Image (cartoon, rainbow, N blue to C red):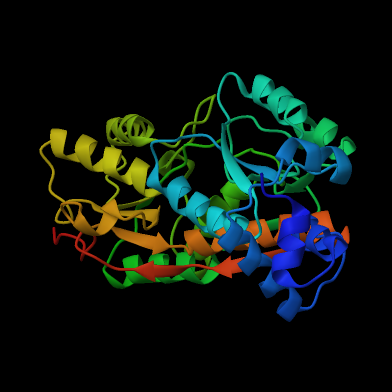
Amino acid sequence: MITRTDVAKKAGVSVATVSHVMNETKYVSPELREKVNTAIRLLNYRPNIVARSLVTKRTKHVGIVVNDITNPYYGEIAQGMEEIAHKHGYTVSLCLASDHFDSYLSSILQRQMDGIFIATVGNGIDPEHFQPLADAGIAIVNGGAKSYVDFDYTDAMNSLIKYYAAMGHKRIGYLSGLSINTPIYDKGNDRYSLYRDSLKKLGLVFKEEYVVDGMYPYKTDYRSGYEAMKTLLKRDTRVTAIFAINDYMAFGAVKAIREEGLKIPDDISVAGCDDIFFSECFDPALTTIRVPKTEMGRQAMYLILNEIREKKTGSLQLKADLMIRDSTGPVKSS
């Protein structure tokens, strides 16, 4: 059985140095760190994780909280998070914020995860849910925590509404999925506020009847987009363009519009948000607000590591931009 002593001999360093490299308990120069890691690979050394966690009080285990495992948006975020976690010897687990969310929180405590990233929005998640985790010393990113990473939609939303206005659209609908009265800690409603502000800046009329609010438990999936668009069409608002809070809801809206015998974008232009990989190959290719999802996952993991190692919190915003495709176009002439 290969031991740390064997690794130390192979690398030409002390056993203490091997421990510091593996447990990240003390600074080790890049040169020595590389020697230790090379020795670990050559010897195929597999440390006893349970024994190590008893010493370090760390499990090298983190989680990412999502509310819809079918949405590729979360998969891209998780990919970025796992990329950085793997480099630093951490394992990432998926936690589903569903009807059984409380049991997941208990599981996080029982498994002694070192940190979690709350990638989801809405779904009735309240910062108080996570206080027991914070009290247990678990690093938390988002969900009302001091560390957070999110997207700045300001320029992208202004660009979308400006583009719609240039195409002659004056009645622009909004499919929320979330509650528009969600508390300020929920970053999901930034888009709603920006939608209203952008309309005002361009002298366009904002009407509540153009907005379809979400209903508890505030899902933002394909079915929610379909039902929201059906509701908007029944109101006979004669909207000529819509924005859906994410691409999944936009896909559902497209189905609802087509069932009414309407054409896209001739009768109604449709735009989404996130730019998941299906959006470009969808028919019609979806106009959407692109966000750097993989980078969000990377930065979230860096924030977790920083809080674990340095006891420091941090925050950052990543910029979103507009991608114009075939699902939007000029308003139909009367």
User: Which residue reaches farthest left?
Assistant: 261
Judge whether residue 245 can be spotted in this image. no
Residue at 87% across / 35% down in the picture?
Answer: 136
Residue 135: percent from left, percent from top: 89, 36
Residue at 33% across / 65% down in the picture?
Answer: 164
Residue at 64% across / 47% down in the picture?
Answer: 46
Q: Nearer the viewer, residue 163 or 147?
A: 147
Judge whether residue 123 can be spotted in this image. yes
Residue at 30% across / 33% down in the picture?
Answer: 226
Q: Quadrant of residue 234?
A: top left
Is residue 264 found left or right of 249 in the rendered image? left
| Picture mark count | 0
Residue 276: percent from left, percent from top: 36, 54
Q: Nearer the viewer, residue 298 or 83?
A: 83
Q: Identify the image quadrant of the N terminus.
A: top right
- Vertical side of 234 occupied by 210: above or below: below
Residue 325: percent from left, percent from top: 24, 65
Q: Nearer the viewer, residue 187 or 34?
A: 34
Residue 296: percent from left, percent from top: 56, 60
Q: Identify the image quadrant of the C terminus.
A: bottom left
